[in-house]
Amino acid sequence: MSVLVLAEHDNASLKDATLNAVSAARALAGFAGGEVHVLVAGSGAQGAADAAAKVEGVSKVLLADDAAYGDALAENVAPLVAGLLANYDAFLAPATSRGKNIAPRVAALLDVAQVSEILSVESADTFTRPIYAGNAIATVQSSDAKKVITVRGTAFPKAAASGGSASVEAVSGAADSGLSSFKGAELTQSARPELTGAKIIVSGGRALGSGEAFTQYIDPLADKLGAAVGASRAAVDAGYVPNDYQVGQTGKIVAPELYVAVGISGAIQHLAGMKDSKVIVAINKDEEAPIFQVADYGLVGDLFQLVPELTSKL
Amino acid sequence: MKILVPVKRVVDANVKVRVKPDQSGVELANVKMSMNPFDEISVEEAVRLKEKGVATEIVVVSVGPAQAQETLRTALAMGADRGILITADGPTESLGVAKLLAKVAAEEQPGLIILGKQAIDDDANQTGQMLAALLGWGQGTFASKVEPSADKVAVTREIDGGLETVELKLPAVVTTDLRLNEPRYASLPNIMKAKAKPIANKTPADYGVDLTPRLTTLKVSEPPKRSAGIKVKTVDELVEKLKSAGVIA
């Protein structure tokens, strides 16, 4: 079975989420000995296409280069994908904000029920996926002839970014739908690693009490560890940090080597976003906090003393 | 402008769900049910647009069991004007619901449809995008700000790296994210008033939509359990443990 993967990219380069999706696609294609192709839809995206061509296991890259695809508007990209899928059995997109925006629109255009955020490929038509914030795992079988799927990145290894030598083929679609236009973006500027790809994450919760406390206590610890900074939904709701810091069911799903939860009680919805981390450290003054039930190492006490001490001793 | 707001009855956000021993699903008997939290944000946004004079009428619609009427009453108590209950027993999938909503939209001719970005039961995050596709409308998903003008709506979206703003031609579909607003609690007088507001009762057959699921749930299981580790007494002990675990240098 042949599988088309939607590349996550910034035109110049490929984002890691693509590599996890390629691994899922290879698992799926493997059930019938098919090929994995990657679609790079963008504007001036030759760089991203060249990077995709080097990914191990990718046999062809489709490059749709048009101003209309530059901002990844779902209204423009979805019809392009739906058209290309005439030649494929399955479409996989990373479960990023971009993939989640585009894939269901593709599914509806093809009259397919999407399978969201798969954790594993069990067979050519059967997948596991989390429901109820990851408190249950459903095994679902799709009866649709074509599959439309989003892939939870943390559940699949990254395909090697080098070693492949796929051809790059230009494709085109209807381009501008006239339904929507891009007006601008305010991206969080940070020298720190990106949350979903970071090896170490330091997250703060409501116990920090203010945005200033994040700057004063969380940031120095993160910088010492070379870590990304995350936050609980409570800290985001309280306005301490922007929403794109949010780790949890309604935010980002992460699985770093080390996750340090500072002043986070461990609500179900937060645990859903980080419980697959390799090592979890919790610092909290409430020794009954649920976060300690998933933490490998718990430290009970005042974060305002313990965090600076930890920062100084690393 | 008329606003259509679809709402879903789901297990309350504070309930810790349990998987049934026979792995056929999660335990739903005697479990508190509520309006999907993202749908509360959608209703609130519609009510605010009406209070600003932008919206003229708010129609709420729910697809689900007969008890979804309670969910519609909650929305009416928050300030929606009338409801449509499309009774569907058995499982519903985003695609089928989107098809029903597209038919409702064709009848009601709303200027804006505001949905929650995902329901907290199946966590699919599909219905709004599918509805927009079926109607051939623009979609502003994961919205943190919604600013309609005469024939357009500017939607600020929560994306992985921060925020982006798109402009959509009206009519359009918007799906709500957490920071769009803080939903109000319905006051007692408004809850009483909501009882007199009309709810139309419909079935999927009335709209000619087949809700037969395309996905079969073979089993539902517990996620792998993570066991609690140890409590360390001091920062020094923590640093030592992390070094021996090899996660820090």
Image (cartoon, rainbow, N blue to C red):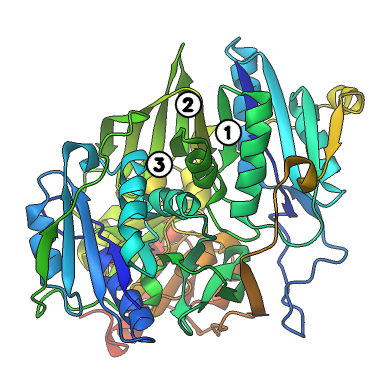
Are labels 3 and 2 on one chain?
A: yes
| Marked residue nearer the N-terminal end (1 or 2) | 1
Amino acid found under the numbered disc labelled 1: Ile
Give the label on residue B158, or none: 3
Which residue is located at x 61 percent, y 24 percent?
A: B110
Give left or right: position of A20 versus A128.
left
Give the label on residue B218, or none: none
Subunit that carries the residue with mark 3? B
Subunit that carries the residue with mark 1? B
Give the label on residue B146, or none: 2
Determine which residue is flagged by label 1: B114
Q: Residue B21 or B245: which is nearer the viewer?
A: B21
Which residue is located at x 23 percent, y 77 percent?
A: A159
Subunit that carries the residue with mark 2? B
The correct choice, above or below, for A43 with respect to B59 in the image is: below
| Marked residue nearer the N-terminal end (3 or 2) | 2
Residue A241, how many percent across, how many down? 39, 43
**Separation of residues labelled 1 and 2 (CA atoms):** 10 Å
**Separation of residues labelled 3 and 1 (CA atoms):** 16 Å
Label 3 element class: strand
Label 1 element class: strand
Q: Dividing the picture into quarters, in which one does residue B194 lie? A: top right
Which residue is located at x 22 percent, y 51 percent?
A: A41
